[in-house]
């Protein structure tokens, strides 16, 4: 009788030990998954906050690592699902939610820049209000790093519409850039805005050089979807940290245009950006005064106006909103 009880006890202990092992392995795997997610998130944040500041101005750079840039008339079956799309599929039918009536066409979608890793960049493209068939093309890049060209560039700075205070409807921007050109807003690098990669390790490898390469691939593959713009004059514009992105991209385009094996010559005509403020000293109004760009009298006048306006701002916080929207309308 005692032997049977002992055997039963051993059996129960054996089953219990198996259950404990399974639970332990599950918790360990679950914890590892959590840690992997944290590492991926931290990697993305690190790439955005601490980009690589390497500027390489050389032809070998332009020639290297571009085996996946599709410049020839390859079989469309070799493209990813994203690249098989046409511009008609990217057409925003009926316009954007809450927008006022408009006469120009708008497009939005993804362009693949790395088929192996599944890395694709999102763009929002607006045709010119008048004569889009003859107007030049502008590629707009916001800075950051990590700033959305859609959320900032298109809807706060220079796109055809701005967001009303209700946060639900749009208003037509008086000085929208698509009144003089066709404008494409690019979310770059992958991880910014709607741009993404199916390979999470890509988020930790972002940098100025990689961003320029991906932006070049975007232009090449975007022209496949919009071939009517291949011969159009191209201007690259942006602000803030795009002051790093734009020169590197322009340099890469020029070098690639000079390669004999290149089948596409991008008609780059100019670049433009508003330099970023690299710190308090750069943004402080004392900075231009120290280089005699502003007079002592002008600086004193600004300081006086600032002091007189502070009580007004405290008493009338709505003035801040009104000033913001007025400035936004002039952008």
Image (tube, rainbow, N blue to C red):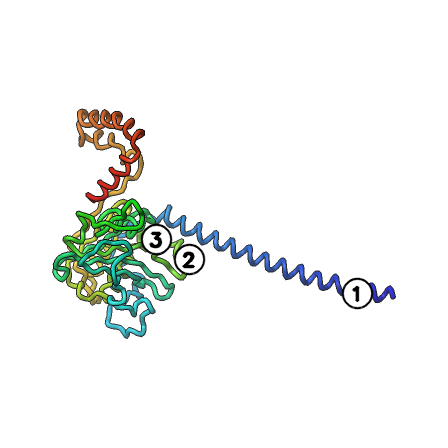
Residue for badge 1 = 8
> Where 2 sits versus 306, above or below?
below
| SS label for mark 1 | helix
Q: Residue at x 55, y 55 (%)?
A: 31
Query: Hey, which quadrant is residue 24 in on the image?
Result: bottom right
Sort mark 3 into few (<14), some (14-19) or many (20+) by Cα contacts within 10 Å: many
- In primary-sequence order, the first of circles 1 and 2 is 1
State the quadrant of the C terminus: top left
Does 226 sit left or right of 187 as displayed? left
x and y percentages locating residue 10 in the rendered image: 77, 63
- In primary-sequence order, the first of circles 2 and 3 is 3
x and y percentages locating residue 241 in the rendered image: 29, 46
Q: Residue at x 15, y 60 (%)?
A: 132
Residue for badge 2 = 201
- In primary-sequence order, the first of circles 3 and 1 is 1
Residues tagged 3 and 1 counted as in contact (Cβ below 8 A): no
Q: Residue at x 25, y 63 (%)?
A: 93
> Where 158 sits versus 133, above or below?
above
Residue for badge 3 = 192
Q: Residue at x 27, y 28 (%)?
A: 312
Sort mark 2 into few (<14), some (14-19) or many (20+) by Cα contacts within 10 Å: some
Query: Hey, which quadrant is residue 328 in on the image?
Result: top left
Does 166 sit left or right of 9 as displayed? left
Q: State the separation of the CA atoms marked 1 and 2.
A: 52 Å
């Amino acid at each position: 009788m005692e032997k049977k009880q002992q055997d039963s006890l051993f059996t129960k202990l054996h089953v219990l030990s198996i259950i404990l092992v399974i639970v332990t392995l599950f918790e360990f795997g679950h914890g590892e998954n959590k840690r992997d997610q944290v590492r991926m998130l931290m990697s993305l944040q690190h790439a955005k906050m601490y980009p690589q500041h390497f500027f390489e101005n050389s032809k070998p750079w332009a020639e290297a690592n571009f085996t996946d840039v599709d410049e020839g008339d390859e079989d469309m079956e070799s493209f990813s699902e994203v690249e098989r799309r046409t511009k008609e599929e990217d057409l925003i039918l009926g316009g954007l939610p809450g927008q006022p009536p408009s006469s120009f066409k708008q497009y939005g979608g993804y362009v693949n820049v790395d088929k192996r890793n599944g890395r694709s960049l999102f763009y929002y493209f607006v045709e010119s209000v008048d004569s889009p068939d003859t107007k030049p093309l502008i590629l707009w890049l916001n800075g950051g790093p990590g700033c959305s060209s859609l959320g900032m560039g298109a809807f706060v700075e220079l796109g055809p519409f701005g967001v009303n205070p209700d946060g639900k409807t749009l208003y037509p921007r008086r000085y929208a850039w698509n009144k003089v050109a066709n404008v494409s807003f690019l979310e770059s690098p992958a991880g910014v805005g709607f741009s993404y990669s199916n390979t999470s390790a890509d988020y930790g490898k972002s940098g100025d050089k990689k961003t320029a390469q991906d932006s070049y691939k975007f232009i090449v593959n975007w022209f496949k979807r919009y071939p009517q713009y291949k011969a159009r004059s191209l201007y690259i514009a942006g602000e803030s940290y795009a002051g790093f992105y734009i020169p590197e991209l322009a340099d890469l385009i020029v070098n690639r245009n000079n390669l004999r094996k290149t089948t596409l010559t991008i008609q780059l005509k100019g670049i433009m950006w508003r330099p970023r403020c690299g710190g308090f000293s750069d943004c402080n109004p004392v900075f231009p005064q120290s280089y005699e760009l502003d007079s002592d009298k002008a600086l004193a006048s600004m300081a006086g106006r600032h002091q007189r306006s502070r009580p007004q701002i405290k008493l009338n916080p709505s003035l801040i909103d009104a000033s913001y929207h007025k400035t936004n309308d002039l952008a």
